[in-house]
Amino acid sequence: MAPSPTIDLPEPNMSDATTRTSFDLVIGGGNYVGLATAVAIKQARPSLEIAVVDAAPAGVWEKDGRASAIAAAARRMLDTLGCWDELVGEAQPINEMIITDSRTADPVRPVFLTFDGTVGAGEPFAHMIANVHMNGALRRRVDELGIVLIEGAGVSGFERDTAGVTITLSDGRTLTSRLLVAADGGRSKLRDLAGIKVNRWDYGQSGIVCTVKHERPHEGRAEEHFLPAGPFATLPLTGNRSSIVWTERTEDANRLVAEDDLIFELELERRFGLKLGEIRVEGPRKAWPLGLTLARDFVGHRFALAGDAAHGIHPISGQGLNLGFKDAAALAQVIVEADRMGRDIGMLDVLETYQRWRRFDTLQMGITTDVLNRLFSNDIAPIRAIRDLGLGLVDRMPRLKDFFIGQAAGMAGPSPKLLQGQPI
């Protein structure tokens, strides 16, 4: 296993983190969406005092061995936030994507659909970036902008009134804020504390995530193989490496992850093939339960949800994190524009603008991924014939292919300024 890359961060301003208690905005959750939201707002409105409260102990983020697909619109946002120059050397562009529909035992997997991986003037529609690099770049900007980062202490409770939010941390500290944003993941404690209900569907599937090293270069090509148990995606990383997102029925996924290295790699090879030579798993392998989760409300009085706290979708489209970045960009724009007009950023009428902007898009993406998963995660002959015919027709229609690439790149529909590469 290759050692995790080390990222040297400037020493945090501990005096601010331990003594300041009054803020304009507190964000619960120190992952990509929470950090990006904080950076976007502070960069546009330096006068706003912002704190990010992360329950995870300091340094845990450096142990994340996963990688994420960053759509072109999200890349533009990261560039505008001052992160991309640091990330570009670690980012692998996706130059091409192919889609197949077959069974695991099939000796040949016919390609039904091929996408050129560019939008506009040759810009890749997506990049693959190691999570540790992306998190590190955002944390540098947090420090540079003077955002207070509190680690190792989560939000244990909060109370709202007409004036603001009183927030209690798990270490006993108390903070006050005009607005509390929950970006603490799919099992959001803050969402539960706010009394926001969710609609949840369990797919009975789990996604196995790991990284493999192979002998021959991938040339920046991503592949998604639709198999009866669920999609098997190979996503290119820097060097002769690929990230695997492998969907199986939950009981099979748990069994595979628990197998020894030899059995696991043999099963992986049956799906990955030998086109890139011998493969070897690098680092840990984990299985994550898959489902569709949609919060019934994205906002409340002095409270907003963002990222996985608001929605969780199937990884079949690779859009989960990009939906979260859209939330960050939209919420930041709403807050910044309200503050410029002298409005209270925690008031419900301000936050409902964010909800109207993001709720329909999220619902639409959730339904789309749900339908795609149900359509392709089966081995029913008539359905296979219909979907393969449909894939073949799309492959022969350039304008329709361009539309789908635009969707994957995050450039369809009205977008927040940051996703267009414009400052707020």
Image: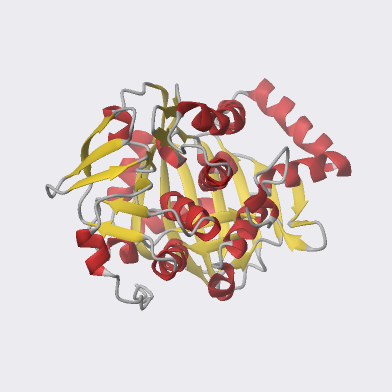
Q: What is the quadrant of residue 300 in the picture?
A: top left
- Using residue 289 as the reference point, say whether residue 105 is left or right of it: right
Residue 423 rendering spot, x and y as whole percentages:
64, 57
Residue at 30%, 36% in the rendered image: 165
Give the answer, above or below, for where 384 lies relative to 419: above
Residue 46 rendering spot, x and y as whole percentages:
48, 60
Quadrant in the picture for the N terminus:
bottom left
Is residue 274 visible from the viewing direction of this image? no
- Using residue 15 as the reference point, say whether residue 389 is left or right of it: right
Q: What is the quadrant of residue 347 in the picture?
A: top left
In depth, the one of 237 and 103 nearer the eye is 237
In depth, the one of 233 and 101 nearer the eye is 233
Residue 293 rendering spot, x and y as whole percentages:
44, 28
Outermost residue to the left: 172
In depth, the one of 360 and 24 nearer the eye is 24
- Using residue 140 as the reference point, say whether residue 227 is left or right of it: right
Residue at 42%, 57% in the rendered image: 210
Query: Number of labelled discs?
Result: 0
Residue 10 rendering spot, x and y as whole percentages:
35, 77
Residue at 38%, 46% in the rendered image: 25
Is residue 157 visible from the viewing direction of this image? yes
Is the image coloured rainbow, by chain, by secondary structure, or in one colour? Answer: secondary structure
In depth, the one of 356 and 30 nearer the eye is 356
Outermost residue to the front: 342
Residue at 45%, 49% in the rendered image: 33
Give the answer, above or below, for where 173 lies relative to 192: below
